[in-house]
Image (tube, rainbow, N blue to C red):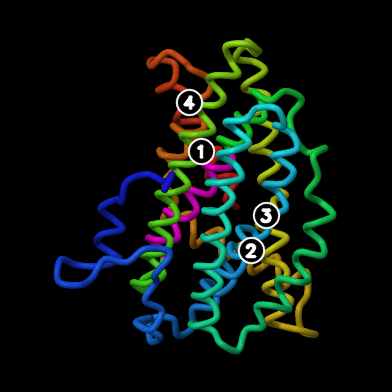
Amino acid sequence: MQGAPMTSSVMKQGHTPETPRWGLDRIPYETIDMARLSGREDLLYMVAGASFVEIASDLYTSNLIEYFEGDAPVVEWLGQHWQHEEVRHGHALKGYVQHAWPDFDWEAAYASFFAEYSKLCTVDEFERTRGLEMVARCVVETGTATFYHALSEQADEPVLAGIAARISAEEVGHYKHFYRYFRQYRETEQPGRMRVFGAIRRRVMEARNSDAECALWHAYATQHGAQASKAGFKTLCNRLGKDLRRHYPISMAAKMTLKPLNLPASLSNVIQGPLARASVWLMR
């Protein structure tokens, strides 16, 4: 497994010394505490939406492999490790949705999402150089790692909290791989901090129009059918963002985002504050 070591939050939420360990390949869905999900439609949208994006990473991986063709170690890791783990995340979340909200038509919602997403996901979206694309990958992994960290704290249902914490740990592991590949490309491309910052900025701004919003819309539209409206969806997104911000690991996000800039420690510490505030703005 390419993910990071199991964290203390995973141990706290997933099992105790008296109960068996479990992982993303063996999730105890039968132990879901349904009472804790009563009235938590917010979790349905977040978990279903996340499952759509993760499972659709099959398409995204194909585009990445095409972009990095010729770099055997990167292509091998993307195809044999990263893709497998991303899709596994999606199926873990899909399984949770189907057990916790059996009336939600996951298959129909995913089909409508993928019909739109597949038109948007193209190689043209990538950065101009491979090194800068690795920077963009670091930003994306920062977003996913911190989202699942926040979800693990927001969810008071133990199985969901455990799934989210485990996924967050693996996303941190993915970040480390992309960062290592960026450092290798940096030796030959020598992009300079301004170009690296440009890649970070572009990817951060794109987060305001993210795949996640597309996925949330299709989860919401499927759940509400003819009653779904753009106004209602906007209200939902505002509420979800507000709830998630209470648990968002701002310092973690700032440190991971800044790392590719390779700033002196003193300057990095100064910038982390404004960047943390920007992270909160992005969550609106």
- In three-dimensional space, the C-alpha distance between marks 3 and 4, rounded to whole angstroms, equals 27 Å
Residue drawn at (55%, 19%) of the image: 184
Q: Residue 155 appears at what percent x and percent y?
A: 40, 68
Tag 2 secondary structure: helix
Q: Nearer the viewer, mark 2 or mark 4?
A: 4
The amino acid beneath tag 3 is Asp
- In three-dimensional space, the C-alpha distance between marks 1 and 3, rounded to whole angstroms, equals 33 Å
Is tag 3's residue or tag 2's residue first in the polypeptide sequence? 3
- What type of secondary structure mainly makes up the magenta span? helix
The amino acid beneath tag 4 is Lys
Tag 4 secondary structure: helix
Numbered range of the magenta stretch: 140-154
Q: Nearer the viewer, mark 3 or mark 4?
A: 3
Is 26 magenta? The answer is: no
Q: Which mark is residue 237?
A: 2
The amino acid beneath tag 2 is Cys
Q: Is residue 245 above or below residue 101?
A: above
Q: Which quadrant of the structure image shows residue 136? A: top right
- In three-dimensional space, the C-alpha distance between marks 3 and 2, rounded to whole angstroms, equals 26 Å
Residue drawn at (29%, 56%) of the image: 9
Q: Which mark is residue 277?
A: 1
Is tag 1's residue or tag 4's residue first in the polypeptide sequence? 4
